[in-house]
Amino acid sequence: MLSRRTWLVGVVVLIAAAATARIVAPTARSPQPSAAATGAPVQFGTLPPGAELPSGMQCARWVRASPSPENRPANKTFNDTGGQNVGPGFFPVSDSPQVKALAARISGAFTGTTEEILRWAACKWGISQDIVFAQAAVESWWQQDELGDWGTQAGRCPPGHGLGADGRPGACPESYGILQDKYPLEQPSWPGIGKSTAMNADAAYAIWRSCYDGYEVWLNDEPKGRLYRAGDLWGCVGRWNTGSWYTPHAESYINLVQEYLRERIWDQPAFKQAG
């Protein structure tokens, strides 16, 4: 299946006010030895809850030891742009306090091709790179300029994207980028999630890790299909789209990501040729 699908489901959880952001320079692209020479992982997999995660700099060295070509040239400016620090207010106050340590890791400090950026985020947050590839295909077809979740409430529009500013009268996009990060819920990560592919993926999988490590305890207070617990990889994938735990919408989204994963949609010729 090669048709593009977009799933736009609103999320109802509000996030704390934004902390003052600091722009972070992307890591330098100095010449790197090959993966064989360094013993760098060629494939990044999922690390268990509470695992010690590699640093962004370590992941950058590993990713650059196995460079990937660019199949989304339209992402170049976004891919060449670094992110920012977000401060402790990035995660909602209803999360467990341990999320503050995760927030301190978010930076978007990487530049590279689109695939390299997705691999970097997968490495940094300890999630299978193939799941990241599949989810990014569902969310945006790997396009950082994707706009989604159009709404009509001015208070949910980010600066510079007021109602009507992006071509739809009376509406503004609430979700941005390759993983469709939601501005109303991630205000401390703005403008990075809109301008930087690495920042967008970094913030998205920090949230996935907070869920996977068991810190999103509020999920048990929302409508759910089963009890929230740490270590449920697919439950946390579904939560990204719906803000809920194994509800019918969440399960539909999980099924679509799994379908793209089985097909390895990113390896299909039509996907590679898309601009």
Image (cartoon, rainbow, N blue to C red):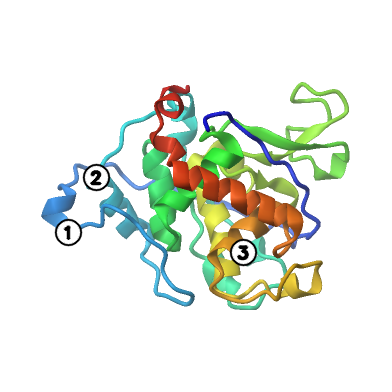
Q: Mark 2 highlights which residue?
A: 66
Please name which of the two marks, 3 or 2, marks the residue nearer to the observer.
3
Distance from Cα at disc 2 to Cα at disc 1? 11 Å
The answer to which of marks 1 and 3 sits earlier in the sequence is 1
Distance from Cα at disc 3 to Cα at disc 2? 30 Å
The residue shown at (88%, 28%) is: 170
Q: Amino acid at mark 3?
A: Gly
Quadrant position of residue 16: bottom right
- What is the secondary structure assignment of the residue under circle 3? helix
Q: Mark 3 highlights which residue?
A: 235
Q: As drawn, is 9 to the left or to the right of 199?
A: right
243 w.r.t. 144: above or below: below
Q: Amino acid at mark 1?
A: Gly
Q: Nearer the viewer, residue 215 or 131?
A: 131
The residue shown at (58%, 71%) is: 100
Q: Amino acid at mark 2?
A: Ser
The residue shown at (59%, 30%) is: 4
87 w.r.t. 131: above or below: below
116 w.r.t. 88: above or below: above
Measured as percent of width and height from the top left, residue 129 is found at: 41, 52
Q: Mark 1 highlights which residue?
A: 39
